Image: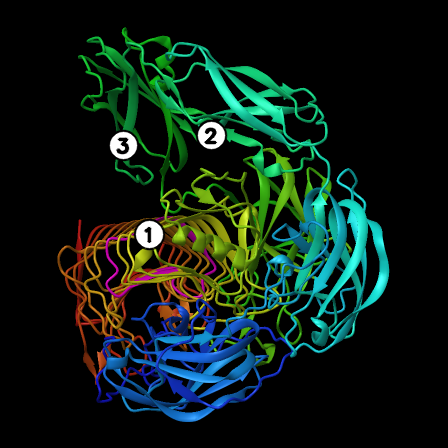
Amino acid sequence: MSPSRPSTPVPSTPTSRPSRSAVPWKRTRLHKRLLGVVSAGALVAATATAVPAATSAPAEGTDLASGAPASASSENWPYEAVHVTDGDPDTYWESTNHELPQWAQVDLGAATDVEQVVLRLPNSWEERTQTLTVEGSTDGTEFDTIVPSDAYVFDPDDGNAVTIDMSETTTRYVRVHVTENTGWPAAQLSALEVYGPDDGNGDDGGEGDGSNLAAGRPIDASSHVHVFEAGNANDGDLTTYWEGAPGAYPGTLTVDLGANADISEVTVALDPDPVWEARTQTFEILGRDQNSDEFTTLVPEADYDFDPATGNTISVPVDATVADVRLEFTGNTGAPNGQVAELGVIGTPGANPDLTVTDMSWSPVEPVETDELTLEATVENAGDASSAGTSVDLHVDGAVAANVDLDALDAGASTTVTADVGALGAGSHEIGAEADPDGQVIERDESNNGYVHGEPVVIGEIETSDLVPDVTWTPDSPGSGDAVEFSVALSNEGSIATTGGPHEITLVIEDGSTGDVLQTLTGTHSGVIEPGETAAPVVLGTWDAGDGRHAVTVEVEADGNEHAVKRDNNTASTSLFAGRGANLPYDIYQAQDAETGGGADIVGPNREVGDGAGEASGRQAVTLENTGDYVEFTTRMDTNTLVVRASIPDAPEGGGITDTLNIYVDGEYIKPITLTSRYSWLYGDEADPGTSPSLGPPRNIYDEANVMFDTTIPAGSTIRLQKDPENTTTYAVDFISVEQVEPEPNPDPDRYIEPDGYSHNDVQNALDQVRMDTSGDLDGVYLPPGDYETAQKFQVYGEPIEIIGAGPWFTRFYAPQDQENTDVGFRVDSSVNGSTFRGFAYFGNYTSRIDGPGKVFDFQNVSDITIDDVWVEHMVCMYWGTNVDNMTITNARMRNLWADGLNMTNGSSGNVVRNVEARGTGDDSFALFAATDSGGGEQTGNVYENLTSMLPWRAAGLAVYGGYDNTFRNIHIEDTLVYSGVTISSLDFGYPMEGFGADPPTVFENISIERAGGNFWGGQTFPGMWLFSASEAFQGIRVNDVDIIDPTYAGIMFQTHYEGGEPVNPVTDTVFDNISITGAQLSGDEYEDRSGIGIWVNEMPEEGQGPAVGSATFRNLHLEDNHEDIRNNTDTFDLVIED
């Protein structure tokens, strides 16, 4: 839709598609409608009504709704409610058309005093009048009228803004309820701004001797409810607060002062707003000395009265020296646990040492790259107490080069430490130091231990050549058996020319698991290479690639003019992966291939939906039903992690259960792993299942769990999963995966800031700090290891940014696990083109499919963004790209989702998806859909490569709908439950869409499809590869080097859509080369007459349709062990089989 809306209403696109009964061949697509309203936590408060008054300008002050969560009664995608608080005047919310009245609302996060609302539309829009009411609520459920219904004129001459004044009112949710709109048959707003009185209500927490030492310090609690987390209790804002979980007494709130402080007073404040009722809280004040692990009582338990009439603040005199202060609550007459808006600790820092590095020097003063360099650092104790002995790290270019002992230092004393750091390469090197890097000494100030010298060490060059080899190979991503040609180019990074040679080059290829040498190739370069130049590549020869990971090492003989200090880089190593599918750093071990004991059974194989074997990979599993049953795996690699795919029963009424299964390593009990069925078990209608067992037969019965070990389990160890007496349910184990991991550090602490904590606000604040930085010194945000709480999408805008975690095992975002279906992730706009998202995981809480929300990366109209090394689980989708260009998505894990894992649509072009694995998706694992309903042009130039799809429980492993010059290669697909392994279709699903272009063609190559196919849509059978000519042109299809193994019904099936008894579009210009179909056997079920077929031209897929129409050419076709190699009983389709 255009932002400038016409004055005459026209019919809009329907918000729902036709039912399957109306269009029997249609598969429900995950599309982009947001339906429903997001709810939030409640705050006990009250509202007041007010008299409306329109004015011309908003009150001075801060828009309280800026960036706040927004929701609506309905949304006409992409005009979502979030746009009313995104600060962009050109984006807007629009409700479902022709269904007034509708509303939009903002959540201010807590009960807040407000006195004005400003409503806006885009400046370019024509004049219109909207009739509306302003309402408020403190709990998001019961709303009162603040401003009665009135008609408001939005005039572009006045900026298309309406200002509504009101008497000062306390509310948390502000809702605008629209009943009429003269300009469009829907409610519309581009901004809903909320302003309050300008007097503020913050508090620093105290008046005693000294300052408030608790402000901004680390703070935690024994529990919290909803979003009322510990960090609210010392953020300087009385309108935010901490509240413990209901009934979880004793409830503790603990602030870390960092070191001992002499404290004189503790203050506890609640919001003084009269909406807070008077209450009595019972708590004890405890403290911990910096040299102790124990808390002791500072003030015994007592009752404290909080009353807004007296400021809702209490002050308790304290005389103690402690490093931590804790409140321990045992009662609250106003809530089921303790509540604190601001905790103040008044005092002065205690006596402690304070180690600082004040200067550095080096010798020799003017070093060259052959000199051994010595660094010297001056360390001072600037504190008021003696320091015990510790150490000092000496840094070169940000890395630790040496660790030196530091003797005890009296207060005010200083000393120097020295260490040899070896020879450094030519150029400038930053040097620095850090006193007490391991935190052995408790200090008055822990933030000033580091030092970076103001001037770098400049290392002079020596006269030498410097040969560096660079290896490349073709093809870039080889398949198993491909002839891989290796070339090596030599560069001279030295200051003088090389000799004329010859320079011998040796390349060794080793098995990545065993280290066995697989091939050695040699070559020679002769001739002088000038400084800074790269010689033409030397072709060393070829190697027939084998499956798996391989190490490639290349070494060039040292040059006669090359000094010994320059020879370390004569050798270079890299890795090469050959084969189909993703190459991620873990091993998968199938349960049916492991050792079993007790009474464990191997079940299957079969292809039954809702069965423990039928929904397992390889279509077999191991069941553990009695005490002592186990399955035991032998590891082929070191690991400190474990992932288990298993099925446990649902609760009798649905909703899942949680239980444990014990882990043994080499026969020794280690720990349990917790499993849940909350995110599995659907029932009834295959196209629209629900979570109640009463709806019918089950499906989607597996899920995954993961755990980290405290130590590394070496390769060759055994990992046993065993049902012991405390493991109280039954289990079906599909597979495990193991992986050795370690956290990635902050790449540059000076350029990547870190959040102050692990809450959503902590991360958003860090993102905002980078966005607002004007120094140009910040590149992004580093997310240290930890579990991050999030209940909404992060808003990322303004400028490109890098958001980097410590790795998906370490930096983990969790949606609230006591809630469900929370839309979390990232929302971006084009101002952040060029950004990077890397190294973290998202664990959602979706328990059913909801079309619209639930995508971690929901991107539209953006480009040049990188998503790398992410793990997404229990969401609707990982990624949905609408009109996105030149995106790079790599090294990702998509697991146990409710719809597509990844989908590119609406003119998305030039994107690369590489090395991604999907497991257990609820729609196509990888999709490309050339729809045009949301803009964008031609969908072309995309590359999907080295992908794995395992166990999609609805739809295909790979689905491509239209476009041209798109390439899909090196892909492995296995165990689709009900659908094809690969779908190639020109079906438009009722949306504007481009068909397949003729030239350049759409290419599918080097693909394995194992145990794929199924039945869906009331009995339609699906093959390993499905070609469906439907609504749009079907042409320009090239399928090369595909192996289809053991399909459920057929290997390849051709189908054509009919309307009114006539075919819509034929299959044309479709060529297959080097195709193998093996093992297509009779299914033995009710669809046996449509099974056991290698290539099937479908003569009647379902009632009301007709035979496939068109032609296809096969070259180098291999058919073996099929019940029926080819079935073509039509006179409408030509199969051309060439040698």
The disc label shown at residue 1138, or none: none
Image vertical order of residue 1023 relative to residue 785, above or below? below
Residue type at mark 3 is: Trp
Give whichever of discs 2 and 3 has the lower sequence position. Answer: 2
Q: Distance from label 1 to label 3 (Cα)?
A: 27 Å
Residue 1120 appears in the rendering: no
Q: Choose top left, top right, bottom left or bottom right for residue 336.
A: bottom right
Q: Nearer the viewer, mark 2 or mark 3?
A: 2
**Disc 3 packing (10 Å; few <14; some 14–19; many ≥20):** some
Q: Label 3, secondary structure: give it.
A: strand
Residue 889 % position (x, y): 36, 51
Q: Nearer the viewer, mark 1 or mark 2?
A: 2
Residue 885 % position (x, y): 26, 56
Q: Over which residues does the magenta segment extend? A: 902-926
Quadrant in the picture for the N terminus: bottom left
Residue 83 % position (x, y): 38, 71
Q: Label 1, secondary structure: give it.
A: loop
Residue position marked by numbered label 2 in the rendering: 398
Q: Choose top left, top right, bottom left or bottom right for residue 517.
A: top left
The disc label shown at residue 865, or none: 1
Residue type at mark 2 is: Gly
Q: Locate residue 518 relative to residue 600 in the image: left or right.
A: left
Q: Nearer the viewer, mark 1 or mark 3?
A: 1
Residue 546 % position (x, y): 36, 35
Image vertical order of residue 176 relative to residue 250, above or below? below
Q: Label 2, secondary structure: give it.
A: loop
Residue position marked by numbered label 3 in the rendering: 473
**Disc 1 packing (10 Å; few <14; some 14–19; many ≥20):** many
